[in-house]
Structure formats: structure tokens, C-alpha cells
Amino acid sequence: MDSLLIRPMVEPDLLAYKALRDGMLAAHPEAFTSDAETEIQRDLASYRSRLTGGANGTTLFTLVALDGGRLVGALTCEREPRRKVQHTAHLVGMMVAASHRGRGLGRALLAEALDRLQATPGLAQVTLSVTAGNRAAIGLYESQGFERYGRLPDAIRLPDGRRLDKDLMVRRLGPAPRA
């Protein structure tokens, strides 16, 4: 992974980001809340909300992973806009191209996101949801300090009739809490 670069997404990345996302939604419907049929119709401009400061400032950043200039992974972080919950951020849309699975790219994206969140003033915790039973993803998140705090039953209903739960996970940021 010597040619791998992780950086914040910029406007020229939007086309490759949409292509990766559309492909991931189609190939892995069980892993995402959004569905491929609806999302493929989305206008490219709608993804500007995923850029830093997008969606009225709630998007903190979207990190992209580039291998030799090809976009092969992404992870978005959003911050709660309401004052009483602004200490909470959310990780959404973790994606790694099939060609790059098992090479540590998801771990690298997650580590970079956590470093950026740790350095963001006022943040105390970050949450995410992951399809229950996705052992690889859950193992990755647990290895980075996330803990399950709940499960949303029947969170996703797939066209083939499957009903999937989502595990809800949280990781504290900042100094360790005092006992």
C-alpha cells in the first residue's frame, strides 16, 4: 500500500466517489441503509453535502483513499448540529473497494478519521451503526475502541425478504474519563 493516499474529499473526487458508492450499494445491500436503485438516480451535485462543511456544516469531512490516483475507499464523518448534542459525531458510509479488501485500508481510513475527530474541539464521542453479524467490520471497530451500546432490530428490510439488525456502537474521544 505504498501508493495509498488518504485525504479529505474534494469536488473533483465526486464522480469517482459516486461510482464507488453506487457499486458498493449494489454489491452489498446488506451493509448499507441506502438502496442502490434509489441512490443511482441521485444527481452528482447532491454529493457536495459530503464535502467538508457540507450539509449546513454538519459534515466534518469525508476521507477518501486513493491508490495510484484511483479512489478505492471512503468514510464520512458528520457532527450533530443541535447545541445539546454537538459533542457527538457519527461515522457513516465506510466503503472499501473489493480490490482492496483485506489490505488494511478500512483500518487506515478509520484511524485517520479518529485522529481528526480527536483533534476536533468540543467532540466527546463518535457513533456508528453496523449490520449485526458483519464480523469483520465489528472486529475492526472493536479493535479501535468502539463498544456496542445497543441493537436496532429489523433495521433493514431487503427486497429478498431478509430483515437485518444494526448494532449501535460508540467510542469516547479525549482523555480517559475519571473514575
Image (cartoon, rainbow, N blue to C red):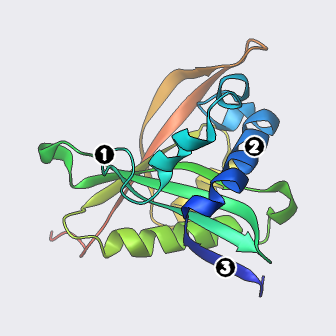
Which mark is first along the chain, 1 or 2?
2
Residue 7, by quadrant, is: bottom right
Instruction: Say few, some or many: other residues with alpha carbon within 10 Å of mark 2 (under 14 / 14 to 19 / 20 or more).
Output: many
Q: Is residue 147 above or below residue 5?
A: above
Q: Distance between the residues labelled 2 and 1?
A: 26 Å
Q: Would residue 131 be seen by someone viewing this image from the given angle?
A: yes
In depth, the one of 147 and 45 nearer the eye is: 45
Instruction: Say left or right for 52 vs 103.
Output: left
Q: Is residue 154 above or below residue 171?
A: above
Q: How far apart are marks 1 and 3 (CA)?
A: 27 Å
Return the x and y of residue 163 as percentages of the image width and height: 65, 18
Query: What is the secondary structure assignment of the residue under circle 3?
Result: strand
Residue 5 tag number: 3
Return the x and y of residue 147 as percentages of the image width and height: 43, 53
Q: In this view, does 74 lie above or below 25?
A: below
For image coordinates 50% across by 54% down, the residue present is: 76
Instruction: Say left or right for 170 vs 86.
Output: right
Q: Is residue 173 above or below residue 51?
A: below
Label 2 sits on what residue type?
Answer: Met
In depth, the one of 163 and 86 nearer the eye is: 86
Residue 87, by quadrant, is: bottom left
Q: Would residue 136 be seen by someone viewing this image from the given angle?
A: no
The residue that label 1 is drawn on is 56
Return the x and y of residue 1 as percentages of the image width and height: 78, 82
Instruction: Say few, some or many: other residues with alpha carbon within 10 Å of mark 3 (under 14 / 14 to 19 / 20 or more).
Output: some
Query: What is the secondary structure assignment of the residue under circle 1?
Result: loop
For image coordinates 68% across by 44% down, the residue present is: 134
The residue that label 2 is drawn on is 24
The mark closer to the camera, 2 or 1, is 1
Quadrant of the rendering where the C terminus is positioned? bottom left
In depth, the one of 33 and 174 nearer the eye is: 33
For image coordinates 31% across by 76% down, the residue present is: 119
